[in-house]
Image: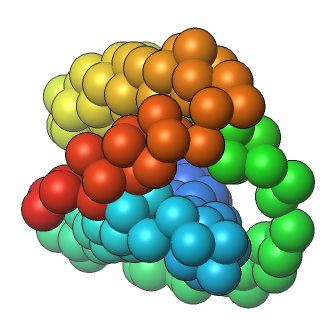
């Protein structure tokens, strides 16, 4: 059985992952509307991944005999400035999520909840990847600067993402 404290924290993180999904859908729509269809596709795949993260947490709460409490999700912004600013915002958001995951992990230790601690290790490792990927895209887009040809090449490359 899961403690009320841990259950609340995990449910709060379901909300955070759902917001990530919603945010990336909004970014995807913005990219597509700005003729960056490749980055739009990349972000849509990322949004689906965030949704899967939320469900992974939800299933864990249920597997532990806990209660899933789905909370309201804020509306994401609709304007993101430039393509490099989109991915700077992705990176900033992922750094924020990493901090949340670390706090959740620390809570599992305080609660002496070994099952949650083991489960959350996956999220800790996943965040390393998420930050590295976002950081790589920001780096490449900054390198490209205001050369549209190079930006469109990156758009095409990242648009190949399947999962
Ligand atoms: Fe599920 Fe990008 O954190």
Q: Can residue 61 be seen in this view?
A: no
Residue at image position (18%, 57%) is: 160
User: Considering only vertical position in the picture, is 116 above or below 36?
Assistant: above
**Residue situated in front as seen by the camera: 112 or 25:** 25
Residue 76 % position (x, y): 79, 72
Q: Which colour scheme is used?
A: rainbow
Residue at image position (68%, 48%) is: 83
Residue at image position (17%, 68%) is: 63
Quadrant location of residue 16? bottom right
User: Considering only vertical position in the picture, is 69 above or below 140?
Assistant: below
The quadrant of the picture occupied by the N terminus is bottom left
User: Considering only vertical position in the picture, is 79 above or below 88?
Assistant: below
Quadrant location of residue 13? bottom right
User: Considering only vertical position in the picture, is 107 above or below 69?
Assistant: above
Residue 155 % position (x, y): 41, 51
Quadrant location of residue 143? top right
Residue 82 % position (x, y): 79, 49
**Residue situated in front as seen by the camera: 84 or 104:** 84
């Amino acid at each position: 059985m899961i403690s009320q404290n841990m259950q609340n924290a995990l449910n709060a993180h379901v909300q955070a992952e759902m917001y990530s999904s919603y945010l990336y859908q909004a970014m995807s729509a913005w990219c597509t509307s700005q003729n960056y269809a490749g980055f739009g596709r990349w972000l849509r795949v990322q949004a689906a991944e965030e949704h899967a993260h939320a469900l992974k947490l939800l299933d864990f709460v249920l597997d532990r005999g806990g209660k899933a409490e789905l909370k309201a999700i804020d509306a994401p912004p609709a304007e993101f400035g430039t393509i490099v600013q989109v991915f700077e915002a992705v990176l900033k958001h992922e750094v924020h999520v990493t901090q949340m995951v670390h706090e959740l992990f620390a809570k599992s230790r305080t609660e002496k909840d070994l099952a949650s601690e083991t489960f959350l290790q996956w999220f800790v490792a996943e965040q390393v990847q998420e930050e590295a990927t976002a950081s790589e895209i920001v780096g490449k887009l900054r390198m490209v600067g205001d050369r549209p040809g190079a930006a469109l090449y990156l758009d095409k490359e990242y648009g190949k993402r399947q999962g």
